[in-house]
Image: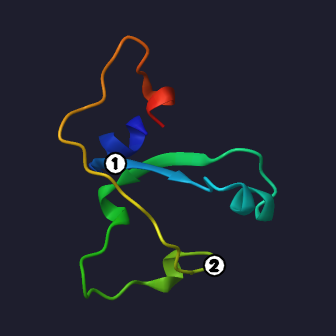
Amino acid sequence: MSLKIAEGRTLKGHKIGLTSKAMQASSQISEPDYGALLDDMFFHDGSDIPTDRFIVPRIEVELAFVLAKPLRGPNCNDVRRL
């Protein structure tokens, strides 16, 4: 991640995927996946999406939350936040 930031990309958020047991089973994994979202991973409303950027393009419903303040607490670390 530090190399991507050094190249000028900006961290915009985080993603958690495959949170349901059904999706985990269909992907043959036993836990959700997670990752960072960078500025070049977003598309403006109405823009053309270059499908050649993706291995198997498809649409999946996602939920996102914008928090007013960072999560804090004595045991609140990156792993627990995800």
Q: Residue at x 30, y 22 (%)?
A: 72
Q: Position of residue 28 (x, y in %)?
A: 82, 57
Mark 1 or mark 2: whose residue is earlier in sequence: 1
The quarter of the displayed image where residue 81 is located: top left
- What's the image's color scheme? rainbow
The quarter of the displayed image where residue 20 is located: bottom right
In front: 60, or 12?
60
Quadrant placement of the N terminus = top left
Q: Is disc 2 placed on a helix, strand or loop?
A: loop
The disc at residue 68 is none
Q: Position of residue 12 (x, y in %)?
A: 29, 50
Q: Position of residue 16 (x, y in %)?
A: 51, 50
Q: Is residue 74 above or below residue 19?
A: above
Q: Residue at x 73, y 62 (%)?
A: 22
Q: Which residue is mark 2?
A: 56
Q: Residue at x 61, y 53 (%)?
A: 19
Disc tally is 2
Q: Calculate the distance from the C-alpha at mark 1 to the C-alpha at mark 2.
A: 23 Å
Inspect the image, locate mark 2, and give the three-letter code of the amino acid beneath it: Val
